[in-house]
Amino acid sequence: MSDAWRPGRRGFLLGAAALGSAAGSARAQPGGFSPSRPVTLVVNSPAGGSTDFSARLVAEPLSARLGVPVVVENRPGGAGVVGVQHAARARPDGHTLLVGYSGTITGWPPVRGTADFDPQRDFAPVALLTEAPQVMMVHPSVPAATLPEFIAHAKARPGQLAYGSSGNGSLQHLGTELLKHRTGIDLLHVSYRGTGETIADFLSGRLQFYMTTPPPVLPSVRDGKLRAIAMASPRRHPSLPDVPTTAEAGLTDYAAEAWFGLFAQAATPPEIIARYAREAEAVLAEPAVANRALEAGAFARFEDPATLRARVERETAAWTALVKAVGIKPD
């Protein structure tokens, strides 16, 4: 397991050693925004998951460029609501940002509504950070080595096989419900508080099927503790080159790719958003950052605020259509 996945203490401080000479030049931004104190990247899930990884991936190089420490603060709880609300209520001064997961940003509202938070109302997109296609897996006790074999196995046992997710509206949940809708299989949904808990039960055999992003499950797949049967993506993944895509496995026009982005409060001044977008683009272009992401099973990928906003709107509409089609209700 790489250092990227070793959970630190809550509020893990990164980048202190990198400040030195960078501090003066980073703050010397005439006519632009520069942070005057440590910057907090809020993650609404526990340390060790994919959102946490994306935050820690950019924290240290971002710290070096900004000239101030960057703190990754994990605030799980309330199915992710606690952390998102904390970030939304922070002062819009560029010192507290949210690293948001696509399941939270685009999957939550169609399932749970916008009473707790509304990503499109409460946040301003800053930059896309990473993308990670979900990998479909079965527990080794399931006699299926391919997606068609699993579908046949599940159809012969309607309602007898279970899958897990990080809660209603998570990409794991919606992606599996889309699979059920497209194939006609019937799987029992078990909701957990986070990826770590889900993986623990999956490894124990309490769950028979699970899909999530590669980073937290790569070691278990490579060790044979879990069996990858398909990538929920239009392309194969370099970390799992022998695992076919869903299209190659016979399920066309299906994809459930996760992404992780940087968001500021909706009232954040444009110059602050512009500064963070520029720095995020520079950080994600660094070969070391791209390589670290790839080693963990993700892709470092930048999108500017306008492009990220369009992505949020498009995916929210797509998940809303699925929720209505299959009748998904809040848990």
Image (tube, grey):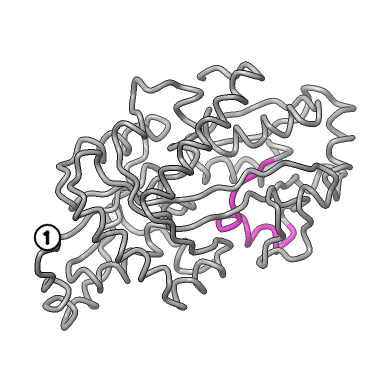
**Secondary element at image label 1:** loop
For the point 34% across and 46% down, the residue is 125
The answer to whether residue 35 is left or right of residue 193 is: left
For the point 56% across and 38% down, the residue is 171
For the point 60% across and 18% down, the residue is 324
The answer to whether residue 234 is left or right of residue 169 is: right
- Where does the image place residue 306, in percent across and percent down from the top left? 38, 48
On screen, residue 83 above or below 295: above
Quadrant where the N terminus lies?
Answer: bottom right
What residue would you read off at disc 1? 37
- Where does the image place residue 173, in percent across and percent down from the top left? 60, 33
Q: Is residue 223 magenta?
A: yes
Residue numbers of the magenta segment: 210-224
Q: Report how many numbered discs are placed on residues in the image.
A: 1
Q: Residues within 10 Å of mark 1 (few under 14, many from 20)?
A: few
For the point 74% across and 66% down, the residue is 241
- Where does the image place residue 43, in percent across and percent down from the top left? 35, 47
Along the line of sight, the residue nearer the viewer: 49 or 308 = 308
Instruction: Look at label 1 and name its amino acid.
Output: Arg
The answer to whether residue 264 is left or right of residue 247 is: left
**Within the image, what quadrant is residue 37 found in?**
bottom left
On screen, residue 157 above or below 26: above
